[in-house]
Amino acid sequence: MSEAVPALSPEQMRCLLQTMYRIRAFEEKVDELFMRGEVHGTTHLSIGEEATAAAALQALRPDDYITSTHRGHGHCISKGADLKLMMAELLGKETGYCRGRGGSMHIADVASGNLGANGVVGGGIPIATGVGLSIKMQGLDRVCLCFFGDGAANEGTFHESINLAAIWDLPVIFLCENNQYGMSMSVRKATRCETIAQRAVAYGIPGERVDGNDVFAVYEAVSRAAARARSGQGPTLIEAVTYRYKGHSKSDQNRYRTRDEIRAWQERDPIKRLAAYLREHSLLTQEEIEREEAAAYQAIEEAYQFALASPEPDPDSLLEGVYA
Ligand SMILES: Cc1ncc(C[n+]2csc(CCOP(=O)(O)OP(=O)(O)O)c2C)c(N)n1
Protein backbone atom coordinates (compact mmCIF):
# COMPACT_ATOMS: atom_id res chain seq x y z
CA MET A 1 0.00 0.00 0.00
CA SER A 2 1.14 3.59 -0.54
CA GLU A 3 3.53 4.96 2.06
CA ALA A 4 1.66 8.23 2.65
CA VAL A 5 -1.16 8.27 5.18
CA PRO A 6 -4.32 8.29 3.04
CA ALA A 7 -6.67 11.23 3.25
CA LEU A 8 -9.57 8.91 4.01
CA SER A 9 -11.55 8.51 7.21
CA PRO A 10 -11.86 5.03 8.78
CA GLU A 11 -15.50 5.08 7.67
CA GLN A 12 -14.49 5.72 4.04
CA MET A 13 -11.96 2.87 4.23
CA ARG A 14 -14.63 0.54 5.53
CA CYS A 15 -16.85 1.66 2.68
CA LEU A 16 -14.08 0.81 0.19
CA LEU A 17 -13.76 -2.67 1.68
CA GLN A 18 -17.54 -3.16 1.48
CA THR A 19 -17.62 -2.06 -2.15
CA MET A 20 -14.77 -4.37 -3.15
CA TYR A 21 -16.36 -7.34 -1.41
CA ARG A 22 -19.65 -6.58 -3.17
CA ILE A 23 -17.99 -6.45 -6.58
CA ARG A 24 -16.21 -9.73 -5.98
CA ALA A 25 -19.29 -11.46 -4.59
CA PHE A 26 -21.44 -10.19 -7.47
CA GLU A 27 -19.00 -11.42 -10.09
CA GLU A 28 -18.41 -14.80 -8.43
CA LYS A 29 -22.17 -15.30 -8.49
CA VAL A 30 -22.39 -14.24 -12.14
CA ASP A 31 -19.57 -16.67 -12.97
CA GLU A 32 -21.46 -19.46 -11.22
CA LEU A 33 -24.73 -18.61 -12.99
CA PHE A 34 -23.05 -18.74 -16.40
CA MET A 35 -21.48 -22.06 -15.53
CA ARG A 36 -24.86 -23.45 -14.51
CA GLY A 37 -26.36 -22.16 -17.76
CA GLU A 38 -28.75 -19.79 -15.96
CA VAL A 39 -27.44 -16.77 -17.87
CA HIS A 40 -26.75 -16.81 -21.58
CA GLY A 41 -24.43 -14.90 -23.89
CA THR A 42 -21.17 -13.75 -22.38
CA THR A 43 -19.79 -11.68 -19.55
CA HIS A 44 -16.47 -10.04 -18.65
CA LEU A 45 -15.40 -10.28 -15.03
CA SER A 46 -13.12 -7.82 -13.23
CA ILE A 47 -12.20 -10.09 -10.31
CA GLY A 48 -8.79 -8.85 -9.13
CA GLU A 49 -9.35 -5.30 -10.39
CA GLU A 50 -11.76 -4.13 -7.67
CA ALA A 51 -9.54 -1.48 -6.06
CA THR A 52 -9.51 0.79 -9.10
CA ALA A 53 -13.29 0.99 -9.48
CA ALA A 54 -13.97 1.35 -5.75
CA ALA A 55 -11.30 3.98 -5.07
CA ALA A 56 -12.00 6.04 -8.19
CA LEU A 57 -15.65 6.48 -7.28
CA GLN A 58 -14.80 7.20 -3.63
CA ALA A 59 -12.81 10.20 -4.91
CA LEU A 60 -15.81 11.64 -6.80
CA ARG A 61 -19.11 13.20 -5.75
CA PRO A 62 -22.48 11.50 -6.22
CA ASP A 63 -23.51 13.90 -9.01
CA ASP A 64 -20.40 13.28 -11.10
CA TYR A 65 -20.66 11.14 -14.24
CA ILE A 66 -18.98 7.94 -15.36
CA THR A 67 -18.70 6.09 -18.63
CA SER A 68 -17.82 2.42 -18.41
CA THR A 69 -16.55 -0.51 -20.48
CA HIS A 70 -17.60 -4.06 -21.38
CA ARG A 71 -16.03 -5.04 -17.99
CA GLY A 72 -18.25 -2.69 -16.05
CA HIS A 73 -19.90 -4.47 -13.08
CA GLY A 74 -17.37 -2.97 -10.65
CA HIS A 75 -17.84 0.56 -11.96
CA CYS A 76 -21.60 0.19 -11.68
CA ILE A 77 -21.53 -1.16 -8.11
CA SER A 78 -19.03 1.52 -7.03
CA LYS A 79 -21.33 4.21 -8.46
CA GLY A 80 -23.96 2.94 -6.04
CA ALA A 81 -26.12 0.77 -8.29
CA ASP A 82 -28.88 -1.36 -6.79
CA LEU A 83 -27.54 -4.94 -6.78
CA LYS A 84 -31.05 -6.34 -7.25
CA LEU A 85 -31.63 -4.37 -10.45
CA MET A 86 -28.18 -5.35 -11.72
CA MET A 87 -28.77 -9.04 -11.10
CA ALA A 88 -32.23 -8.84 -12.69
CA GLU A 89 -30.63 -7.25 -15.75
CA LEU A 90 -28.18 -10.13 -16.08
CA LEU A 91 -31.00 -12.63 -15.83
CA GLY A 92 -32.92 -10.78 -18.55
CA LYS A 93 -35.80 -9.79 -16.25
CA GLU A 94 -38.24 -6.91 -16.66
CA THR A 95 -37.08 -5.41 -13.33
CA GLY A 96 -33.49 -5.00 -14.55
CA TYR A 97 -31.85 -1.63 -15.19
CA CYS A 98 -32.59 -1.88 -18.93
CA ARG A 99 -35.69 -4.07 -18.55
CA GLY A 100 -33.52 -7.11 -19.28
CA ARG A 101 -32.62 -5.95 -22.78
CA GLY A 102 -29.05 -4.85 -22.06
CA GLY A 103 -27.48 -7.62 -20.01
CA SER A 104 -24.01 -7.55 -18.51
CA MET A 105 -22.44 -5.19 -21.05
CA HIS A 106 -25.08 -2.49 -21.22
CA ILE A 107 -26.09 -1.52 -17.72
CA ALA A 108 -26.80 2.18 -17.44
CA ASP A 109 -28.42 4.27 -14.72
CA VAL A 110 -28.51 7.78 -16.10
CA ALA A 111 -30.30 9.16 -13.03
CA SER A 112 -27.28 8.33 -10.86
CA GLY A 113 -24.74 9.60 -13.40
CA ASN A 114 -23.79 6.14 -14.69
CA LEU A 115 -23.95 6.78 -18.44
CA GLY A 116 -23.50 3.16 -19.26
CA ALA A 117 -21.29 0.19 -19.92
CA ASN A 118 -20.34 -0.26 -23.56
CA GLY A 119 -19.72 -3.29 -25.76
CA VAL A 120 -17.65 -1.20 -28.17
CA VAL A 121 -14.02 -1.09 -27.07
CA GLY A 122 -13.11 2.58 -26.58
CA GLY A 123 -16.77 3.54 -27.09
CA GLY A 124 -17.04 5.38 -23.78
CA ILE A 125 -14.08 7.67 -24.48
CA PRO A 126 -15.70 10.07 -26.98
CA ILE A 127 -18.92 9.95 -24.93
CA ALA A 128 -16.97 11.16 -21.88
CA THR A 129 -15.45 13.97 -23.91
CA GLY A 130 -18.93 15.00 -25.07
CA VAL A 131 -20.15 14.91 -21.47
CA GLY A 132 -17.19 17.07 -20.47
CA LEU A 133 -18.12 19.60 -23.14
CA SER A 134 -21.72 19.60 -21.92
CA ILE A 135 -20.62 20.15 -18.30
CA LYS A 136 -18.39 23.03 -19.36
CA MET A 137 -21.03 24.71 -21.57
CA GLN A 138 -23.59 24.50 -18.78
CA GLY A 139 -21.11 25.78 -16.20
CA LEU A 140 -21.74 22.81 -13.89
CA ASP A 141 -19.43 21.87 -11.01
CA ARG A 142 -19.12 18.25 -12.14
CA VAL A 143 -16.59 15.92 -13.70
CA CYS A 144 -16.87 12.88 -15.93
CA LEU A 145 -14.68 9.88 -15.21
CA CYS A 146 -14.03 7.63 -18.19
CA PHE A 147 -12.96 4.02 -17.59
CA PHE A 148 -11.26 2.15 -20.44
CA GLY A 149 -8.78 -0.69 -20.91
CA ASP A 150 -5.21 -0.89 -22.16
CA GLY A 151 -6.50 -2.30 -25.46
CA ALA A 152 -8.81 0.71 -25.89
CA ALA A 153 -5.79 2.99 -25.55
CA ASN A 154 -4.76 1.83 -29.03
CA GLU A 155 -8.06 2.83 -30.65
CA GLY A 156 -8.15 5.96 -32.80
CA THR A 157 -10.94 7.40 -30.70
CA PHE A 158 -8.65 7.46 -27.64
CA HIS A 159 -6.29 9.92 -29.34
CA GLU A 160 -8.97 12.08 -30.93
CA SER A 161 -11.07 12.34 -27.79
CA ILE A 162 -8.24 13.12 -25.40
CA ASN A 163 -6.81 15.69 -27.79
CA LEU A 164 -10.16 17.52 -27.94
CA ALA A 165 -10.64 17.32 -24.17
CA ALA A 166 -7.14 18.75 -23.74
CA ILE A 167 -7.47 21.74 -26.09
CA TRP A 168 -10.87 22.62 -24.63
CA ASP A 169 -9.82 22.06 -20.98
CA LEU A 170 -12.75 19.71 -20.38
CA PRO A 171 -13.46 18.30 -16.90
CA VAL A 172 -12.76 14.67 -17.81
CA ILE A 173 -10.63 12.06 -16.04
CA PHE A 174 -9.40 9.38 -18.43
CA LEU A 175 -8.74 6.31 -16.28
CA CYS A 176 -7.07 3.39 -18.02
CA GLU A 177 -7.42 0.07 -16.23
CA ASN A 178 -4.31 -1.66 -17.49
CA ASN A 179 -5.04 -5.28 -16.66
CA GLN A 180 -2.13 -6.38 -18.88
CA TYR A 181 -4.18 -7.92 -21.71
CA GLY A 182 -6.57 -6.97 -24.52
CA MET A 183 -8.26 -10.37 -24.88
CA SER A 184 -5.13 -12.57 -25.36
CA MET A 185 -2.84 -9.73 -26.50
CA SER A 186 -0.25 -8.73 -23.92
CA VAL A 187 0.08 -4.98 -23.47
CA ARG A 188 3.83 -5.38 -23.94
CA LYS A 189 3.28 -6.67 -27.46
CA ALA A 190 0.52 -4.21 -28.31
CA THR A 191 2.40 -0.98 -27.70
CA ARG A 192 6.02 0.17 -27.91
CA CYS A 193 5.50 2.79 -25.17
CA GLU A 194 6.76 1.85 -21.75
CA THR A 195 3.59 3.12 -20.09
CA ILE A 196 0.17 4.29 -21.24
CA ALA A 197 0.34 7.26 -18.87
CA GLN A 198 3.31 8.71 -20.78
CA ARG A 199 1.05 9.23 -23.80
CA ALA A 200 -0.36 12.24 -21.92
CA VAL A 201 2.72 14.19 -23.01
CA ALA A 202 1.43 14.07 -26.59
CA TYR A 203 -1.74 15.92 -25.55
CA GLY A 204 -0.10 18.39 -23.15
CA ILE A 205 -1.92 17.08 -20.07
CA PRO A 206 -0.69 15.38 -16.88
CA GLY A 207 -0.26 11.60 -16.99
CA GLU A 208 0.10 9.48 -13.90
CA ARG A 209 0.75 5.76 -13.43
CA VAL A 210 -0.40 4.17 -10.18
CA ASP A 211 -0.64 0.74 -8.61
CA GLY A 212 -4.23 -0.12 -9.48
CA ASN A 213 -4.38 -2.74 -6.72
CA ASP A 214 -3.69 -0.08 -4.09
CA VAL A 215 -6.94 1.66 -3.15
CA PHE A 216 -5.13 4.58 -1.56
CA ALA A 217 -2.91 5.26 -4.58
CA VAL A 218 -5.91 5.26 -6.93
CA TYR A 219 -7.92 7.44 -4.55
CA GLU A 220 -5.14 10.04 -4.34
CA ALA A 221 -4.58 10.15 -8.12
CA VAL A 222 -8.28 10.48 -8.97
CA SER A 223 -8.76 13.12 -6.24
CA ARG A 224 -5.95 15.19 -7.76
CA ALA A 225 -7.39 14.80 -11.26
CA ALA A 226 -10.90 15.72 -10.06
CA ALA A 227 -9.64 18.88 -8.31
CA ARG A 228 -7.79 19.86 -11.50
CA ALA A 229 -10.87 19.23 -13.65
CA ARG A 230 -13.19 21.19 -11.33
CA SER A 231 -10.86 24.18 -11.31
CA GLY A 232 -11.04 24.45 -15.11
CA GLN A 233 -7.54 23.10 -15.79
CA GLY A 234 -8.77 20.24 -17.97
CA PRO A 235 -8.30 16.51 -18.22
CA THR A 236 -5.81 14.06 -16.71
CA LEU A 237 -4.77 10.63 -17.95
CA ILE A 238 -4.35 8.03 -15.20
CA GLU A 239 -3.08 4.51 -15.76
CA ALA A 240 -3.97 2.07 -13.00
CA VAL A 241 -1.84 -1.07 -13.25
CA THR A 242 -3.89 -4.08 -12.29
CA TYR A 243 -4.78 -7.64 -13.36
CA ARG A 244 -7.80 -9.82 -14.08
CA TYR A 245 -7.67 -13.31 -12.57
CA LYS A 246 -10.38 -14.77 -14.81
CA GLY A 247 -10.32 -15.17 -18.57
CA HIS A 248 -11.20 -12.31 -20.90
CA SER A 249 -14.77 -13.61 -21.23
CA LYS A 250 -16.57 -16.92 -20.93
CA SER A 251 -14.85 -18.46 -23.96
CA ASP A 252 -11.26 -17.78 -22.79
CA GLN A 253 -8.97 -20.80 -22.36
CA ASN A 254 -6.22 -18.73 -20.70
CA ARG A 255 -3.55 -20.13 -23.03
CA TYR A 256 -1.58 -16.90 -23.32
CA ARG A 257 -0.41 -16.67 -19.70
CA THR A 258 0.93 -18.94 -17.00
CA ARG A 259 -0.59 -20.09 -13.73
CA ASP A 260 2.47 -18.65 -11.96
CA GLU A 261 1.74 -15.21 -13.39
CA ILE A 262 -1.85 -15.34 -12.15
CA ARG A 263 -0.70 -16.60 -8.74
CA ALA A 264 1.86 -13.81 -8.41
CA TRP A 265 -0.86 -11.22 -8.95
CA GLN A 266 -3.19 -12.95 -6.53
CA GLU A 267 -0.56 -12.38 -3.87
CA ARG A 268 -1.12 -8.66 -4.45
CA ASP A 269 -4.88 -9.04 -4.15
CA PRO A 270 -6.42 -5.61 -3.57
CA ILE A 271 -9.02 -6.79 -1.06
CA LYS A 272 -6.54 -8.73 1.06
CA ARG A 273 -4.21 -5.74 1.02
CA LEU A 274 -6.83 -3.31 2.31
CA ALA A 275 -8.03 -5.84 4.91
CA ALA A 276 -4.44 -6.27 6.14
CA TYR A 277 -4.00 -2.48 6.38
CA LEU A 278 -7.21 -2.09 8.38
CA ARG A 279 -6.14 -4.87 10.77
CA GLU A 280 -2.59 -3.61 11.20
CA HIS A 281 -3.81 -0.08 11.95
CA SER A 282 -6.48 -1.39 14.35
CA LEU A 283 -9.25 0.14 12.27
CA LEU A 284 -11.17 -3.12 11.93
CA THR A 285 -10.79 -6.48 13.68
CA GLN A 286 -10.53 -9.73 11.73
CA GLU A 287 -14.04 -10.53 12.94
CA GLU A 288 -15.43 -7.23 11.59
CA ILE A 289 -13.70 -7.83 8.26
CA GLU A 290 -15.25 -11.29 8.00
CA ARG A 291 -18.63 -9.79 8.83
CA GLU A 292 -18.27 -7.31 5.96
CA GLU A 293 -17.39 -10.14 3.61
CA ALA A 294 -20.34 -12.25 4.72
CA ALA A 295 -22.71 -9.26 4.40
CA ALA A 296 -21.61 -8.75 0.78
CA TYR A 297 -22.30 -12.39 -0.14
CA GLN A 298 -25.65 -12.17 1.66
CA ALA A 299 -26.61 -9.02 -0.31
CA ILE A 300 -25.76 -10.79 -3.57
CA GLU A 301 -27.83 -13.82 -2.62
CA GLU A 302 -30.78 -11.51 -1.91
CA ALA A 303 -30.24 -9.82 -5.28
CA TYR A 304 -30.27 -13.21 -6.98
CA GLN A 305 -33.48 -14.24 -5.22
CA PHE A 306 -35.09 -10.93 -6.27
CA ALA A 307 -34.01 -11.54 -9.87
CA LEU A 308 -35.31 -15.11 -9.84
CA ALA A 309 -38.70 -13.99 -8.57
CA SER A 310 -38.94 -11.14 -11.10
CA PRO A 311 -41.11 -11.42 -14.21
CA GLU A 312 -39.77 -12.09 -17.69
CA PRO A 313 -40.36 -9.24 -20.18
CA ASP A 314 -43.71 -9.50 -21.98
CA PRO A 315 -43.09 -10.85 -25.53
CA ASP A 316 -45.52 -8.19 -26.81
CA SER A 317 -43.02 -5.52 -25.74
CA LEU A 318 -40.27 -6.99 -27.96
CA LEU A 319 -40.26 -4.11 -30.43
CA GLU A 320 -40.43 -1.33 -27.83
CA GLY A 321 -37.36 0.88 -28.04
CA VAL A 322 -36.34 -0.54 -31.42
CA TYR A 323 -35.97 2.07 -34.15
CA ALA A 324 -35.63 1.34 -37.86
C1 LIG B 1 -14.30 -1.58 -31.52
C2 LIG B 1 -14.15 -2.98 -31.02
N1 LIG B 1 -13.11 -3.74 -31.44
C3 LIG B 1 -12.96 -5.01 -30.99
C4 LIG B 1 -13.86 -5.54 -30.10
C5 LIG B 1 -13.67 -6.97 -29.56
N2 LIG B 1 -13.14 -6.88 -28.19
C6 LIG B 1 -13.94 -6.98 -27.12
S1 LIG B 1 -13.11 -6.77 -25.69
C7 LIG B 1 -11.64 -6.59 -26.48
C8 LIG B 1 -10.36 -6.36 -25.71
C9 LIG B 1 -10.35 -5.07 -24.98
O1 LIG B 1 -9.21 -4.95 -24.19
P1 LIG B 1 -9.06 -3.78 -23.15
O2 LIG B 1 -9.49 -2.50 -23.75
O3 LIG B 1 -7.66 -3.85 -22.63
O4 LIG B 1 -10.09 -4.14 -22.00
P2 LIG B 1 -10.11 -5.42 -21.05
O5 LIG B 1 -10.91 -6.47 -21.78
O6 LIG B 1 -8.70 -5.83 -20.83
O7 LIG B 1 -10.78 -4.98 -19.81
C10 LIG B 1 -11.82 -6.67 -27.86
C11 LIG B 1 -10.72 -6.53 -28.85
C12 LIG B 1 -14.94 -4.73 -29.68
N3 LIG B 1 -15.85 -5.16 -28.80
N4 LIG B 1 -15.04 -3.46 -30.13
Image (cartoon, rainbow, N blue to C red):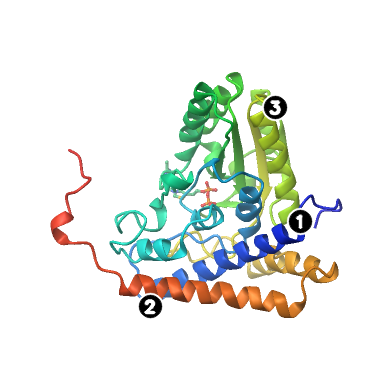
The reply to whether residue 67 is visible in this rendering is yes
Of pointers 1 and 3, the one earlier in the residue sequence: 1
Position in image of residue 68 (x %, y %): 49, 46
Badge 1 amino acid: Ser
Badge 3 amino acid: Val
Residue at (32% x, 62% y) in the render: 95
Q: CA distance from mark 2 to mark 3?
A: 47 Å
Q: Residue furthest left?
A: 316
* Residue at disc 1, secondary structure: loop
Q: Which mark is residue 201?
A: 3
Position in image of residue 245 (x %, y %): 59, 65
Q: Is residue 77 above or below residue 132?
A: below
* Residue at disc 2, secondary structure: loop
Residue at (63% x, 30% y) in the render: 235
Identify residue for label 2.
36
Residue at (82% x, 53% y) in the render: 2
